[in-house]
Image: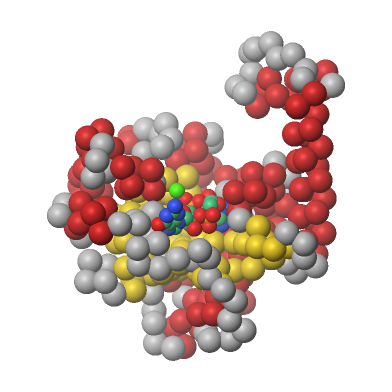
Amino acid sequence: RADTALRRAKSDGGNKKVLFEAAMDDAVRERYSIEADLRRGIAAKELRLYVQPQFDSTRKVCGYETLVRWQHPERGIVPPAVFIRVAEESDLIVEIGRWILSEACRFIVRLSLSGRCVPVSVNVSPREFHQRDFVERVKNTLAESGADPQQLVLEVTEGLVISDFDAVIRKMEALASIGVHFSIDDFGTGYSSLAYLKRLPISELKIDKTFVQDAPQDANDGAIVESILAIARHMKLRVVAEGVETEEQAAFLDARAAVIHQGYLFARPAPVEAFWGLEIEPSEG
Ligand code: C2E
Ligand code: CA
Ligand code: CA
């Protein structure tokens, strides 16, 4: 119990007193049970690749984001919100990342065989990126699948660059030099400095859905979106707005820049099999 309280104190930022409460025990037990179940699920091949298309200002598909789902035998489709954080606290995130990356590369190959050479984005957790062999692994996966590195976009968050900036930039440059693109996900929600960001080989910013969704009504969120667009313009970066759900949100963005839209208004994430007309499962919502 002391250990549980200590761990909570550390995860809340450290340098503080935390008293043990029964609810913490429940949370720990819940985490371990998800972790054990996930470990089993990965081995039993229960992970599923979902893809969500992105649309340019003429409403043409100009890319896809890959999103992982867990097809649980009893619980049905489990969204990443339930298990990604647990996975990130163990090495399971590395296994998930490996699987998603190789599936994403297969998707890229199938897209280009059907004449659609659009970029495919993959979310990369900091823990995965910090693995010693991350660069090698991405290169090998690309080579083994035959996917064009130019079509691969790795989405990283601002939090990645908080520690060990030099190592991060070295890895990013190694991958950028073979054509891989980088995107900063949830841009504006972290604490990264623009001075650092401008040294990174990035080609895209993603505006978090909280800003996108409130921009038309909330002057502060509107101003944040406009600032992000201004930064992107100066740094010559692509901008993807995630979570576009209404015409009003789309119009707000379209009035300001040639933003790429990703959101329920245009398309929900769907299983990759549905995309190819195989084994159709219902899409979300
Ligand atoms: P994210 O990278 O910010 O992904 C965008 C999330 O917004 C996705 O949730 C997507 O389904 C959802 N979304 C898209 N359009 C709309 C919309 O119009 N309205 C609303 N309300 N939501 C929309 P999802 O798939 O549940 O993923 C949640 C998070 O889990 C992701 O956030 C990402 O951080 C993480 N994640 C998902 N797949 C992976 C993965 O393969 N690897 C890693 N490391 N993380 C992943
Ligand atoms: Ca993302
Ligand atoms: Ca987001």
Q: Residue at x 62, y 84 (%)?
A: 279
Total number of numbered labels? 0
Say which of 254 and 247 sits in front.
Answer: 247
Say which of 216 and 69 sits in front.
Answer: 216
Which coloring applies here?
A: secondary structure
Q: Is residue 132 visible?
A: no
Taking 274 as reference, is 63 above or below it? Answer: above
Taking 281 as reference, is 86 above or below it? Answer: above
- Relative to 18, 217 lies left or right: left
Q: Residue at x 39, y 79 (%)?
A: 117
Taking 249 as reference, is 42 above or below it? Answer: below
Farthest residue to the front: give it.
285
Percent across and percent down for residue 44 are 80, 67
Q: Quadrant of the N terminus?
A: top right
- Relative to 130, 257 lies left or right: left
Farthest residue to the top: give it.
17
